[in-house]
Amino acid sequence: RRRRRLRVFCQGQQAGPLGGPPARRGAAPWGSMAMNYNAKDEVDGGPQCPPGGPAKNRRPDNTAFKQQRLPAWQPILTAGTVLPTFFIIGLIFIPIGIGIFVTSNNIREIEIDYTGTDPSSPCNKCLSPNATPCYCTINFTLEQSFEGNVFMYYGLSNFYQNHRRYVKSRDDSQLNGDSSALLNPSKECEPYRRNEDKPIAPCGAIANSMFNDTLELFLVGNESYPTPIPLKKKGIAWWTDKNVKFRNPSGGESLKERFKGTTKPVNWVKPVYMLDSEPDNNGFINEDFIVWMRTAALPTFRKLYRLIERKSDLHPTLPAGRYYLNITYNYPVHSFDGRKRMILSTISWMGGKNPFLGIAYIAIGSISFLLGVVLLVINHKYRNSSNTADIT
Amino acid sequence: TLCMAYKHLTSKEYEEIDRRLFEARTALQQREEKLAHVFQFIEKDLILLGATAVEDRLQDRVRETIEALRMAGIKVWVLTGDKHETAVSVSLSCGHFHRTMNILELVNQKSDGECAEQLRQLARRIKEDHVIQHGLVVDGTSLSLALREHEKLFMEVCRNCSAVLCCRMAPLQKAKVIRLIKISPEKPITLAVGDGANDVSMIQEAHVGIGIMGKEGRQAARNSDYAIARFKFLSKLLFVHGHFYYIRIATLVQYFFYKNVCFITPQFLYQFYCLFSQQTLYDSVYLTLYNICFTSLPILIYSLLEQHIDPHVLQSKPTLYRDISKNRQLSIKTFLYWTILGFSHAFIFFFGSYFLIGKDISLLGNGQMFGNWTFGTLVFTVMVITVTVKMALETHFWTWINHLVTWGSIIFYFIFSLFYGGILWPFLGSQNMYFVFIQLLSSGSAWFAIILMVVTCLFLDIVKKVFDRQLHPTNTEKAQLTET
């Protein structure tokens, strides 16, 4: 290991690059000047060479880092360097935008609002029902057939799942199957924490307001005999949510035993262990429940309800024609001016139907290309003057 | 200055002189006059040998340094305790006064009225003659008279002179002059350079005090903000180190405000969509770590290492210093530019993500839905990438450390988010972010949106920079071009 050269600067030596003798700066600058003040130093202009070893050297090292001499790349954003980039961006973005736009246009989507605020709507009677549950049916027609997998969503409007008090009103340990949290839910769930002196499972406002309409779809075929469309209820929640984040509490044989000592949320009809007959879709791991618990970002949102799987390649999944939507109207939204709707949509690799991304790419690509052309013209015009200009 | 002369004395003459001296020295009355009389008797008919003088040489390259200071737009005043003739000749020799300058004098004023009259005269002369450059010489007594009653008039005269020389100045008067300049209407920044103990009050009074470690001891250096060993080092201190430091600090301040505007504005915009319930857009861990981990290192390294122009160019072209005079890079105009840029970026982040979701369409290939945390993470991801690449755009001096922290910050963000969302943390009450980031990254739409938003934001900035450089380049930008 190379020994660091200790430069000794005492009287009589050559001055270094900085000039005169280095800092034997008289100690603490402001206070204790008297302490190290040595009149002889002033006159001589430097410390005497001590007879023995080297003097203490406070000079910074002569390394590239400390003397700011590191090698560096020094790019400059001139028109020459940036022009090709603008053109490249234009040439790449516009085709991408067109591709995305075409993909989005090929997605089929239909929205059926079934809130029933309009007196002529079939679901109007369910706004103030005389008998619960209220059933209503909405007819609609598909102009074009839907190919491939079709996804059925329910959508709500003016429903602020992103309100702060609402978002934090849950207990993730309870939903993860933690037995202590099952019987003693978190304080965040207040006021939906205990009811009739028993802890609520699942606690919180999010669980309490779970969507409980039932939607069924029927195709009116050639024979005026409506065929039900098979709706698949598995695979609508995130895999990690269903298998890792949400777990039923462990314990007894049946699910009902495991939830012993808790009560259902206030607004629910059935307790959580009776959400579905199938055991792997019951309790906390019910997929509809999991989908509801993922709070939406905006007040107008939709959640995945059912999947309609594609049939063989010859037949479209949903052929064009007339359809019935049978609704078990349980969920009241009228009081807060909310709206409910059902959405049927096909999905591409980039998700649902939204022309925004495609249009944005085309727009940015064209602007970039245009500015590239403008810059080229300006560069050409000012090329001479900028070369001969001197620093005044 | 001394004259040397000699005379041969015979022993008789010597004894005569000796006797007279003895009488004069031992006289009881009027000793002084008698001695003077005898000295006059002795010092006659001498033969001149020559004259001696002491040369107090100017330091090396003082002339060039003062010339450079003047080219940089810095006004130079010389405050000295020497007498009038010495001071003027030193000024002429060191380049402070030119031979072509018209030297105005305010010296030997005996009374207040006289001083005022002289000042008015000088002001008139300056007004009459615009073409020629004026220099002013003031001495200590006249200065105290002028400052007592006629400050404004005196400052008026000084402002119109390109060089001012104050001679016969007492140490406290030097400080007084500096104070006077500091409180004048333009509020200039003052820098005092001195090397002796009599300069200490001046050094302490000025905004920046520089002491030269020299033959007159270390008092000045001890009391200064910066100590240098030679006067010529002032040019490197100001034009290289001072210039670098200013650019680094001004950009640091502006960038900090910019990145925090980018950070908080989407939070604010989100309130319009969540009933103003103060629901946060980003997870609390992201809120904490944004300024500490994800965006701190690039700007730190910039403010330590940035060199927008080569040091040799800076030192050889002092006029480049004018580009940062009057605190230009922290002016309202620059601040507004950065702030408006921050706001426009924040709007692009938020509304880009907002319109991407539209009426809440799915962004995944399997039709599943995102929630509010995924939305917030999308905005946050775009933001971290954009502010880091913006810093990259501002950097002119790319050392390996810059590469490491810039690209490393972005990579660290991704790795951290994957790690943070990868497991269920046992001690955390809420598991909001579990797997959110990975789900976001598995959406093709989200990736395209991220790229689009980053490009759009920086596009505006690049366009502005390039157009500015093409259409009206500053001296700094021209210097950057010439050296490549």
Image (cartoon, coloured by chain):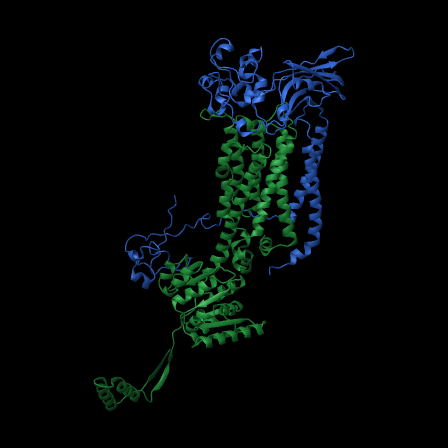
Percent from the top left, x then y, of residue A77?
A: 61, 48
Q: Is residue A336 left or right of residue B134?
A: right
When the figure is inspected, residue A233 is found, relative to residue B142, above or below; the finding is above
Question: Which residue is farthest bottom?
Answer: B12
Percent from the top left, x then y, of residue B256?
A: 52, 44
Q: Is residue A335 left or right of residue B232?
A: right
Residue drawn at 44 percent across, 76 percent down: B109
Question: Which lettered chain is shown in blue?
Answer: A
When the figure is inspected, residue A175 is found, relative to residue B189, above or below; the finding is above
Question: Which lettered chain is shown in green?
Answer: B
**Displayed quadrant of residue B23:** bottom left
Say which of A23 and A31 sits in front.
A31
Q: Is residue B39 left or right of residue A101?
A: left
Look at the image and tell me whether residue B215 can be seen: no
Residue drawn at 34 percent across, 84 percent down: B5
Say which of A275 and B66 sits in front.
A275
